[in-house]
Image (cartoon, grey):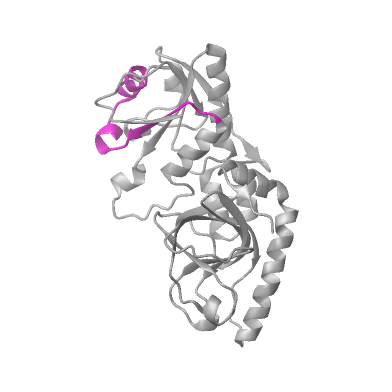
Amino acid sequence: MEIIRINYRNIPELPKSVACIGFFDGIHRGHQALLKKSISWAKEKNMYSSMITFDPDPWKVFFPQKVCEHLTTIRDRVHIAKKIGIDYVYVLTFSKGFAANSVEDFHEILHKMNIQALVCGFDFQYASKNSGNVHTLQNQSYFEVEVVSSINEEDQKISSSRIEPLVKSGDVLKANQLLGYVYSLSGYIGHGFKRGTNILRIPTANLNLKDEYVLPQVAVYSGMVSFEDCIYPAMINVGRNPTFDNELLTIEAHIIGFNGDLYDKNARFFFLNKIRDEKKFDSIDELRNQLLKDIETTKNEMITYKDFVESTSVLWDKKLFNE
C-alpha cells in the first residue's frame, strides 16, 4: 500500500482508482463496509482501490484551541486500511482554503485525482458549508457513485459519535463490537511512581500518550499490551490510584508473563472489557489482593473473548504470547 499526501492546489499524477471517502475516525464496521466495497468494485473494474481521508481534523482547523480527541490517529487509520486491503491512501490536507471549495470544485479535485468511481456513506457531506451531499455527487458526470446504506447494530447506525460515549463510559466491550476490533491507545512507556514494583509487588508499565485519544472511563480493565512483535495479556488501570491519593491521571498495565524493561519503548494498550470501577482501599494488602483477583479475571477473559484477542493480534501484526 502507498500513502500519498495531497495539497488540492497541486495534485500529482495518480493511477485510476475506485475510492471511498470520509474522515474514517475509528475505521469501525460501517467504515469497513465502504472500504470493502471499494476493493471489490476496483477488482471488477481492474483498477486500484483507494481511501480518501483528511488531515488535520477539520475541527482543529476551524477551532485550533479545541481539544480534538479521536478513536484513531491518522497512522492507526492507515494501518487498518492496509490490513483490509486498500491499495492507496490519499490524505488530503485540510485547510480553510480547501473547505471553501464549491461543490463543482470538489468534483474537479476528485477528477484530477483520477477517481473513476466513488463509494461514500448515505450521509456524506462535503464542500463549502457542507453544501454537497450524495445527491450532488450522483448528479456529476466525472465518476460513478455508489452510496452505502447505514450499517446498523441493534437498529442503530454504527458511527464514531455512537462509539465515543461507550468508550468514555467504560463500556469498551460494546465499543469493540461496533468497531470490529479491540479499542486501543498508542504511546510510549514512561516512568511512574514505582509503587507497583516496590510496594505492591505487582509491577506496572505506564503509558504516556502522544496523541489526543478518546480515553476510557476511570476503571480497571482486562486487556492486552503490545510492543515490538508480541502481544501480552494485561490488567489495565485508568485512574488516579485513590488508595495513594494521587491527583494525576495515569494509564498503567500489569503485563502478565513479562518482567523486562520497557522504558521509552513504543507500546499499545488494548481495552477488552471493564472489570470494575476504581476504588479507594483501606490498606495496601486489601488493594494487592484485589489486584491479584483482577489479574485472574483478565486471564479468564482472554479465553472468554478469544476471537477478539486473536483478531487483534492479526490486525496489528503481533504474535500472541503464551505463558
Identify the residue at the far bottom of this view.
283
Residue at screen point 31% across, 32% down = 128
* Nearest to the observer: residue 147 or residue 23: 23
Residue at screen point 74% across, 55% down = 303
Residue at screen point 53% across, 12% down = 45
| Location of residue 265 (image quadrant) | bottom left
- Picture coordinates of residue 181, whole percent (x, y): 61, 45
Q: Is residue 24 visible?
A: no
Q: How many marks?
A: 0
- Picture coordinates of residue 291, whole percent (x, y): 65, 74
Looking at the image, residue 232 lies above or below residue 136? below
**Which quarter of the figure is the C terminus placed in?**
bottom right
> Does 11 sit left or right of 44 as displayed?
left
Looking at the image, residue 252 lies above or below residue 273? below
> Does 300 sit left or right of 245 as displayed?
right
Q: Is residue 267 visible?
A: yes
- Picture coordinates of residue 109, whole percent (x, y): 32, 22
- Picture coordinates of residue 216, whole percent (x, y): 53, 60
Looking at the image, residue 154 lies above or below residue 53? below
Q: Which residues are magenta?
A: 85-112
> Does 305 sit left or right of 19 as displayed?
right
* Nearest to the observer: residue 150 or residue 113: 113
> Does 135 sit left or right of 322 as displayed?
left
Looking at the image, residue 320 lies above or below residue 189? above
Determine if the magenta segment contains residue 8: no
* Nearest to the observer: residue 164 or residue 173: 173
